[in-house]
Structure formats: C-alpha cells, structure tokens
Image: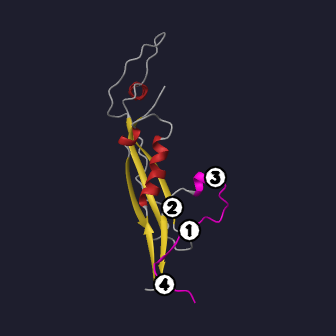
Amino acid sequence: MCSLSKPLTYRYVPSFPLSDLALEKAPYCFDFVADRKTLTLTVNCYPAVVAHHAAYGLIDGRGDGLEKEVSVTFRLSAHQDDPVLERFKLHNCHDLPETNVELKDEFSLYQRQRKAVTKMLRIEREEVTFDELEMSEQPMPGSTGWSLIAKATRLANLKGG
C-alpha cells in the first residue's frame, strides 16, 4: 500500500508519439490532480492555451503589433456542438452611390453595374472592413465531451486588387 503526503498530479499525454522536444514542453489545456487522501479529482483548465492557438492564426506571419488588435473570448463547453456564429453577410450595393465609367462607343452601364463598380473600388482602396475570425477547440481527454473553445477576432480590411 502506498501513502501520499501531497496530491499527485496527472498530466494527459497524447497517445501519438511526440518527437519534437518543443512540442513535448508545450502547455496543455487541462491538468488533472488526484488527491487520494480526500478522494477527489480536480480538473484545472488553462484557457490561455486555447486562446493563444486561436489568436496565432490571426497574427502569424502578418507583421508586428497585430496582437494588440486581436480580441479573444473562450468558453468551457459541456457538450460538443458546432459553435454558434453569425452567418456571413455579404452586403449588397443598393445603398451605394453610382460610379460613372466611360466606355468605348455609345455603351453605358446599368445602374446596378455602376453601383457594383463603386463597391469594387472601395474594396480595392481597402475601405471595406470585416471581422476576421479564427477558432480553436481543445477537447478534454477521454470521453467526457467537454472542451475549451476560443474565438479570436480582429477588424481587418478586405483586400482587393
């Protein structure tokens, strides 16, 4: 029989072999502490790990200072559903002014085409913004159905050209 004076800490190790030393030292989202004295199991969650995974997708290789523009939220999900996200909305050109385009001969654009040209020019000048989004989900080991989910967003200019 074994007696313990302090709690044991169990760290989940993935079942696949880790050959890269840096990957072996990477932090985990969940840590389990079993206390045989009190017969309790404590599960610690580290949302910063999953938050960094989500934010990394928005800033990696895009220049310095972008981390200041990223907003990250997280949640602990007790069941695995698809995250609820607003549908991507593509705004139409109805409220835009018309851009006059000179064409060869006696041709002219329709009103809707002139408004579409206005939208294309705004995109080309990077005047159209959108919420860029990156998500990361880290499931708790085992068949618990629990996971940490992080969503990173930043306001970005729609690139055109």
Element type where label 4 sits in the image: loop
Above or below residue 92? Residue 110 is above
CA–CA distance in space, label 2 to label 3? 15 Å
Give 70 or 65, whichever is nearer the viewer: 65
Q: Identify residue for label 2.
A: 28
Residue 129 location, x and y as percent?
Answer: 37, 36
Q: Position of residue 59 (x, y in %)?
A: 46, 41
- The Cα–Cα distance between marks 3 and 1, rounded to whole angstroms, is 17 Å
Residue identified by numbered label 1: 12
For badge 2, the amino acid type reads: Tyr
Q: Which residue is mark 4?
A: 36
Query: Distance between the Cα atoms at labels 4 and 1?
Result: 18 Å
Q: CA distance from mark 3 to mark 4?
A: 33 Å
The range drawn in magenta is 1-24
Tag 4–tag 1 contact (CB < 8 Å):
no
* Residue at figure coordinates x 58%, y 52% from the top left: 22
**Badge 4 or badge 2: first in the primary sequence:** 2
The span from disc 4 to disc 2 (Cα, nearest Å) is: 23 Å
Q: Is residue 157 left or right of residue 60?
A: left
* Residue type at the position of mark 3: Asp
Tell me the crowding category of disc 3: few under 14, some 14 to 19, or many 20 or more residues within 10 angstroms, Cα based.
few
Q: Which type of secondary structure does the marked residue at label 3 adopt?
A: loop
Q: Is residue 138 visible?
A: yes
**Of callouts 2 and 1, which one flags the residue occurring earlier in the amino acid sequence?**
1
- The reply to whether discs 2 and 1 touch (Cβ–Cβ < 8 Å) is yes
The amino acid pointed to by label 4 is Arg
Question: Is residue 39 positioned above or below 118 on the image?
Answer: below
SS at badge 1: loop
User: Does residue 20 belong to the magenta stretch?
Assistant: yes
- Disc 1 marks a residue whose amino acid type is Tyr
